[in-house]
Amino acid sequence: MRTAKLESDDWVNGFLFVANRPILDFLNTRPVLAQEPTELLTDVHALERWLIASGIVHSPKMKGQLRSWRHSPEAALFLKDLLAFRERLRDAVLRLEAGSAPSDEFIQEVNDGLLKHPLAATLRKRDGGIIREPFFEFKRPSDLWTPFYNGVSDLISDPETQRIRRCEACVVHFFDTSKKGSRRWCSMNICGNRLKVAAYQRRKRDGHNSSPGCAGIVSAT
Ligand SMILES: [Zn+2]
């Protein structure tokens, strides 16, 4: 039951989307499930599903291109490099969360990546106005670097990097977009309720009589 609830609220097609930034959702593709770090991007097909679930890839043409790479050795090599990059990104994010800056090597790596994989833009009419959207063209698997390098550069140059935070109860990272900037958990369904219930049970055990203050939390445990 609980799994079904999580699927509907925080998971899309087997991936967690709670971070408010696709690049942090990407970082969260190696969560700790059942006590063990679990790789969700297990192969190129899984990456294809993640790129679609994240909304980065949406056009039928791009989806078709991704599908054609499922068994491509070049795409497999790209995925291997991408997962190694994800762990270097993890180090950069942990540094930011600790109030420090990413390493010079990491910034240089992203700079090199931005030069090699610049982000194009396209204009489109919508609702009587004109909007500017990122434009990706995937001719070869290495073109997939574009959204990742650009997502990282947007994240680490954000004026509010103090809003990049790790859940107080698990390994999931997120960008706090709450008004007060006081978000503490990856998700109320996953960790928030669990911690509230634990605190409630602790208070009860200690003889206090306070309420957990959130309807329905017992059913979520
Ligand atoms: Zn959590």
Image (cartoon, rainbow, N blue to C red):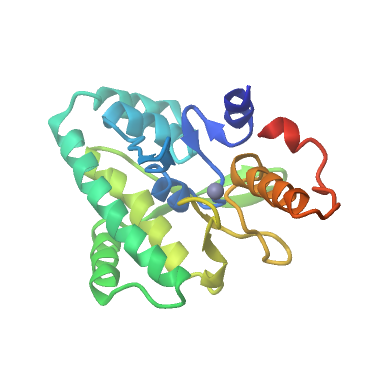
Q: Is residue 150 left or right of residue 84?
A: right
In percent of the image, x 38 and y 50: which residue is there? 147
Residues 48 and 85: in front is 85
Query: Is residue 62 positioned above or below 31 on the image?
Result: above
Residues 134 and 186: in front is 186
Residues 144 and 79: in front is 79
User: Residue extending furthest left?
Assistant: 73
In percent of the image, x 48 and y 48: which residue is there? 22
Query: Is residue 62 positioned above or below 201 on the image?
Result: above
In percent of the image, x 62 and y 44: which residue is there? 125
Q: Is residue 109 left or right of residue 64?
A: left
Query: Is residue 99 positioned above or below 152 on the image?
Result: below
Q: Position of residue 200 (x, y in %)?
A: 74, 49
Q: Position of residue 50 (x, y in %)?
A: 41, 34
Query: Is residue 88 positioned above or below 160 on the image?
Result: above
Q: Is residue 215 left or right of residue 9?
A: right
Q: Count the marks: how many?
A: 0
**The quarter of the displayed image where residue 156 is located:** bottom left
Q: Position of residue 88 (x, y in %)?
A: 28, 59
| The C terminus - image quarter | top right
| The N terminus - image quarter | top right
Residues 125 and 148: in front is 148
Q: Is residue 167 left or right of residue 201?
A: left
Q: Position of residue 85 (x, y in %)?
A: 26, 54
In percent of the image, x 71 and y 43: which residue is there? 127
